[in-house]
Image: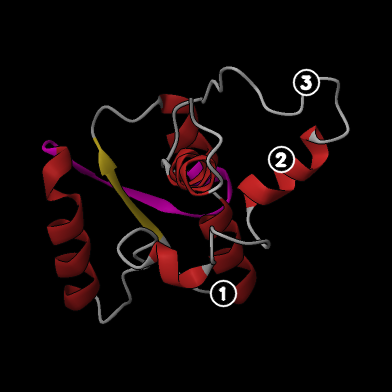
Amino acid sequence: MSEANFARLLGLPFIAVMPTSTAKRKIEQIAVYGGQCHFVADPCALYDTSLQLACDLNGHFMDQFTFAERATDWRGNNNIAESIFRQMSLEPFPVPHTILMGAGTGGTSATLGRYIHNQGLAT
């Protein structure tokens, strides 16, 4: 949704490639921000379909996962996990026993998992 919004602000078209099983609310939100949705039946085809679509339209595939570890250093500061744990340090129980995640792209859960492992917080 945020990518659709930024594309709209820049006057660029935005197409989200997603599984046909994507929640209706997410699809509606992308449309609210001016984005289009391109559906694939097989979620394993997301990357190939995105690359092909970008090529066909002379566009760019914004691959947020393949090189995500290069975008931010999850071992130090400047990431959501470090920010969460910094805020938690002010709580009576600063290291949580359990972390529950909502479904999404997996970026936040991956960053939290890497951070917890790197900091030796996993039991």
Q: In the drawing, does residue 6 fall left or right of residue 20?
A: right
Q: Which residue has dot 3 on it?
A: 93
Instruction: Specify the segment rendered in magenta.
Output: 30-42
Viewer-side residue, 105 vs 79: 79
Disc 3 or 2, which lies upstream in sequence?
Answer: 2
Q: Which residue has dot 2 on it?
A: 85
Q: Residue at x 41, y 42 (%)?
A: 105
Q: Residue at x 60, y 75 (%)?
A: 10
Q: Which kind of residue does numbered mark 2 sit on? A: Phe
Q: Position of residue 13 (x, y in %)?
A: 44, 68
Q: Which kind of residue does numbered mark 1 sit on? A: Gly
- Between circles 3 and 2, the one closer to the viewer is 3
Say the numbered circle drawn on residue 11.
Answer: 1
38, above or below 11, in the image? above
Q: Position of residue 19 (x, y in %)?
A: 24, 37
Q: Position of residue 107 (x, y in %)?
A: 46, 47
Q: Secondary structure at mark 2?
A: helix
Q: Which kind of residue does numbered mark 3 sit on? A: Phe
Q: Badges 1 and 3: C-beta atoms under 8 Å apart?
A: no
